[in-house]
Amino acid sequence: MRILAIETSCDDTCIAIVEASPRRGSKIPHFRVLANVISSQTEIHKKYGGVVPSLAKRAHQENLVTVLEKALGEAGMKLSPSAKSYTKGQSKIKNAGKILEREPELLEQFIKTVVPIPKPKINFIAVTHGPGLEPALWAGINFARALSYWWRIPLLGVDHMEGHIAANFLHTGKVEFPAIVLAVSGGHTQLILVKDILKYKLIGETVDDAAGEGFDKVARMLGLSFPGGPKIAKSAKGGNPKAFDFPRPMLHSKDYNFSFSGLKTAVLYTIRDLTVTSKIKKDIAASFQQAAVDVLIAKTIRAAEEYKVKTIMLAGGVAANEELRKQFGEVIKKELPDTLYKIPHTSLATDNAAMIAAAAYFRRNKATLTRWKTLKANGNLKIG
Ligand code: KG4
Ligand code: ZN
């Protein structure tokens, strides 16, 4: 079974084609990533210090067709124009035009590039419908709707966070339930109990900033460019994580919620009262990172113990953080040695469409030929 997935919830334009085949003894199939194209908009948003939704939408509209062409090419699917495609007639093109009426540039490229190529061998199309920036989500959704209508391929909407969790399944069939997921991205910090495939219970989340947001904001204070997570991680390598004793907010609170705003403020005050040399900058980065990592690990371990889980998984952009991955592994080995520990490949932790395809596989029964008529963006979509 082949799935074409589209992801435009934030600032990356992503299209992937993933093949899934059943795996004996596991609910998780063998996934083969045939194409996973990511067109980053970092250069566009960098000067604003964060993602500007209207600019993200524009860039998605400009890039989607090129990214699709690249993905089909990588997956070895035919791109040469076929006479058959044109015979669908003007009325069908007109209807596709209605779907893309708010994306004139995308429509122009659609007619020029997608209309002439043959229908690819894809079983269904999946697109992120939330959570995320609504203008950005709409670009991907309307493109997916037009493709579904034009090719007559069933369509379904996928939850972005479910995608992050499913990134773990792209390279392993060995996940035992119940599992706990620490989902940490630019917009979310959540502890999710996964009782079984598709059975989620949100047991805790951030009460203010998301973990990734914390990394991005502290990076900005230190004069490091957007997105800050990888920059902080790099700078921290040369620093002392014990140099500054930053707070570990809510470390001992009885619930499973997080808070990163106080930690961010503590860093701000430290910077304000110091002359920040390049050595101090590295020490601040390392100490901040350690404070965040300590809280994330401690709370997840406590939840894992309480819910007696068999697997601990990381998900989301911050799961690309080397120290978090490493230290988490060490703590689990020491404190919960019988628990499986799963982390997505570093390149699949941050936003991509292969993870959306993986999540879509489990929801495939919801894909329909008429979904293009009803699918909508929901910026605040919540898992569970
Ligand atoms: O999941 P993601 O790609 O996009 C959202 O859904 O938000 O996550 C992006 C977030 C950003 O805040 C970025 O700074 C952070 O993940 N991030 C990292 C690392 N790589 C990305 N944070 C810490 N260390 C990293 N290596
Ligand atoms: Zn994400």
Image (cartoon, rainbow, N blue to C red):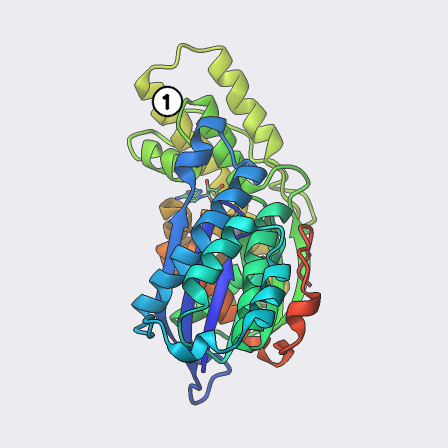
Q: What amino acid does circle 1 point to?
A: Lys
Q: At which x and y percent is residue 360?
A: 54, 71
| Residue at screen point 63% across, 38% down | 259
Q: Is residue 300 above or below residue 210?
A: below
For the residue pair 70 and 24, the one nearer the viewer reads as 70
Q: Residue at x 41, y 25 (%)?
A: 284
* Quarter the C terminus occupies: bottom right
Is 56 drawn above or below residue 71 in the view shown?
above
- In this rendered view, identify the residue nearer to me: 370 or 218: 370
**Residue 73 horizontal/vertical position (percent):** 31, 67
Asked if residue 24 is positioned above or below residue 271 in the image, the reply reads below
Q: Quadrant of residue 156 in the image?
A: bottom right
Binning the other alpha carbons within 10 Å of mark 1 as few (below 14), some (14 to 19) or many (20 upward) gives: many
Q: Is residue 174 visible?
A: no
- Disc 1 residue lies near ligand 1 with CB under 8 A: no
Q: Give me the residue at 41% from left, 72% from top.
A: 18
